[in-house]
Image (cartoon, rainbow, N blue to C red):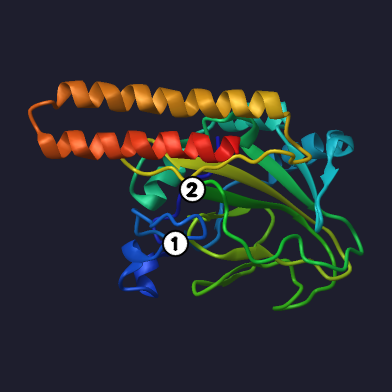
Amino acid sequence: MLMDVPVSLQRKCLSDTNPQWWLTPNLNNVCPEINFACCEPFQVISEKELTKFIDIINKNKSKAVQYSRSFTIRGIPEIDEILGCSNLEMILSKIVGIELKMHPIKVEHSHVNLQAKNEESAVDDWHLDYVPFVFVILLEKSGKETVGVNSGRLCTKDFGDFSMKPGEGILLQGSHVLHKAEMCEEGSRTSLVISLVPKNIELYDCTMVYKHRPTYDEQSIFYDFISYRMANIKEMGQNILSSYHSDENIKFWISRIRDECMIIENCLI
């Protein structure tokens, strides 16, 4: 079991810095529908459980693939199993105020980012995610006892920079909040990134998948992705049949079906 959300947990909304947040598209030209930016760090993994996660990652380090700025391990079965049997979805749904679920695409469930010791660049630069929500848990951090820049913070544009302790996590609407993970000066940093989507298919899921990513089994990822999108289209079609008496409702679901088809087409280009 993961630790529950503190009653006093502070949340930040997109409207805190942008009164017209719902009219502001991201880089994929998608406007947000949920007025949530991020939460402050909170303890989600106990010290005892943290040791288990670190042991699992150490056993899988040989699977790490180097990107331009860090090493990444995707799809560690033992971690996905722990998360799948946990109360994670319930915990994070409380924070946002809507039901969230683990990403339906298996390879997107979670990945581990590793900053090797003596690395001189940040784990990643400023970016938006290609999945709606991410929950970032710091698992390990070492290095100089610095405060501020190069202390391994998770930084956001407009919503603050957060120092985290091992076992703490931050939930972000990463598709609409610019963020980056800093390096730990003269040390290392290991974080677990968990991807989530809204359970309600009325809410737009901006997830994209891309060809030629070094950690992807392309055949598997595209099969899972198209299966997920087609399941959404099927459910949307059923909603049309059950609401044929309302023209506005039908128009809404037809628009959503069109969006789903466009996403599939864009990912196949």
User: Residue 44, position in %: x, y?
Assistant: 57, 48
The residue labelled by disc 1 is 37
> In the rendered image, which quarter contains the N terminus?
top right
In this picture, is 192 found above or below 17? above
Q: Position of residue 20 (x, y in %)?
A: 31, 70
- Which quadrant would residue 70 be assigned to in this image? bottom right
Quadrant containing the C terminus in the rendered view: top right
Number of residues whose C-alpha sits closer than 10 Å to that of mark 2, classed few (under 14), some (14–19) or many (20 or more) = many
Image-based side of 55 in relation to 240, left or right? right
Residue at image point 42% right, 61% down = 25
Residue 76 lies in quadrant: top right
Q: Seen in the image, is 153 located left or right of residue 55?
A: left
Residue 39 relative to residue 15: left or right: right
**Position in image of residue 86 (x %, y %):** 54, 32
Q: Residue at x 85, y 35 (%)?
A: 63
Kindly identify the amino acid type of the residue bearing the numbered disc 1.
Ala
Q: Which residue is disc 2 drawn over?
A: 132
Badge 2 marks a residue whose secondary structure is loop
The residue sitting at 50% across, 75% down in the picture is 158
Residue drawn 51% across the image and 42% down it? 207
Which SS class for mark 1?
Answer: loop
Give the amino acid at mark 2.
Pro
In this rendered view, identify the residue nearer to me: 117 or 63: 63
Q: Can residue 200 be seen here?
A: no
**Residue nearer the viewer, 220 or 59:** 220
Q: Position of residue 99 (x, y in %)?
A: 37, 40
Position of 252 relative to 13 (above/below): above
Which quadrant of the figure has residue 108?
A: top right
The residue positioned farthest toward the right in the image shown:
118
Q: Is 104 left, or right, of 17 in this rendering?
A: right
Q: CA distance from mark 1 to mark 2?
A: 11 Å
Q: Is 40 placed above or below 251 here? A: below
